[in-house]
Image (cartoon, helix red, strand yellow):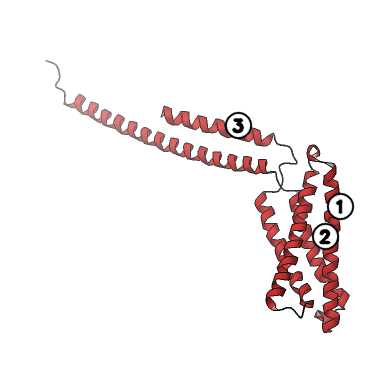
Amino acid sequence: MEELAQGLDDAQRRLEEARHRRDGLQSSQVSWPLYVVVILGLVTIVLEYVPASLYTQIFVSADDSVRTLLTLTFTVVGAILAIVLGELLHRTRRPTDQQVSDKVFIVLTVLAAMIYLYLGYRLRVAFTEVSGTTALNLSASEEALALTSVALIGILVTVISAYYRESYEAFAMRRKVGSLQQEVNRAQARYKEVNGDLTRARKAVAGKNGVATGSNSTTAAPPP
């Protein structure tokens, strides 16, 4: 029991130390969990793929494999621009990490994203004008604007989630605290189990001794 109690105390001490280090992190480091950012990143890929697949319809002379490659290229470019811009903006949350080059890269990335969206818009307008068909009786510009808005929303989703994501240090500390909490729970459960077994064993022994004592007292012969 002493060994179990010591192990439980040690696990609780390490858990408290990990919590203290986690609570000591800056507020800019503790925010949206990384798994949420990853899920939103997947959403961005879908939101980029849908308009990209329609942008590339203008390349009517290309075969299906080339159009597929162009679609994937448009999708990846949009996702990469969103990730890069989000990470650059994330650095602004920690003034100690900021550099002059970060501002330059932010401006360049924003310009690249604007060019990317404008290019997609023009490609869709061109295809609609050539084919002469639009969805829901929209004009060529309205249809292209709707698709470009979807791509823009996809970029914003990743930019915002990357900006508010937790730091990798906070991610590691959160996982460590969770692991230590599970260790403490297992130690507590083991301690309670063994303590319960010992308590029941003591009661059983005490009951047997009580029965034996009572039996001896009733059967003992009286003195002459």
Labelled disc at residue 107: 1
On screen, 51 above or below 202?
Answer: below
Q: Position of residue 216 (x, y in %)?
A: 19, 26
Q: In this rendering, does residue 174 appear at all?
A: yes
Q: Is residue 58 left or right of residue 40?
A: right
Q: Secondary structure at mark 3?
A: helix
On screen, 216 above or below 183?
Answer: above
Q: Is residue 17 left or right of residue 217?
A: right
**What residue would you read off at disc 2?**
113
The crowding category of the residue bearing disc 3, from other C-alpha atoms within 10 Å (few below 14, some 14 to 19, many at least 20), is: few
Mark 3 touching mark 2, by CB under 8 A?
Answer: no
Q: CA distance from mark 1 to mark 3?
A: 42 Å
Mark 1 touching mark 3, by CB under 8 A?
Answer: no
Q: Amino acid at mark 2?
A: Ala
**What residue would you read off at disc 3?**
17
Along the line of sight, which residue is nearer the eye, 123 or 153?
Answer: 123
Q: Quadrant of residue 146?
A: bottom right
Q: Amino acid at mark 1?
A: Val
Point out the image quarter for the N terminus. top left
The crowding category of the residue bearing disc 1, from other C-alpha atoms within 10 Å (few below 14, some 14 to 19, many at least 20), is: few
Between disc 1 and disc 3, the foreground one is: 1
Labelled disc at residue 55: none
Point out the image quarter for the C terminus. top left
Q: Position of residue 8 (x, y in %)?
A: 49, 32
Q: Residue at x 60, y 31 (%)?
A: 17
Q: Earlier in the sequence, mark 1 or mark 2?
A: 1
Q: Residue at x 47, y 31 (%)?
A: 7
On screen, 109 above or below 138?
Answer: above
Q: Secondary structure at mark 1?
A: helix
Q: In this rendering, does residue 47 appear at all?
A: no
Q: CA distance from mark 1 to mark 2?
A: 10 Å
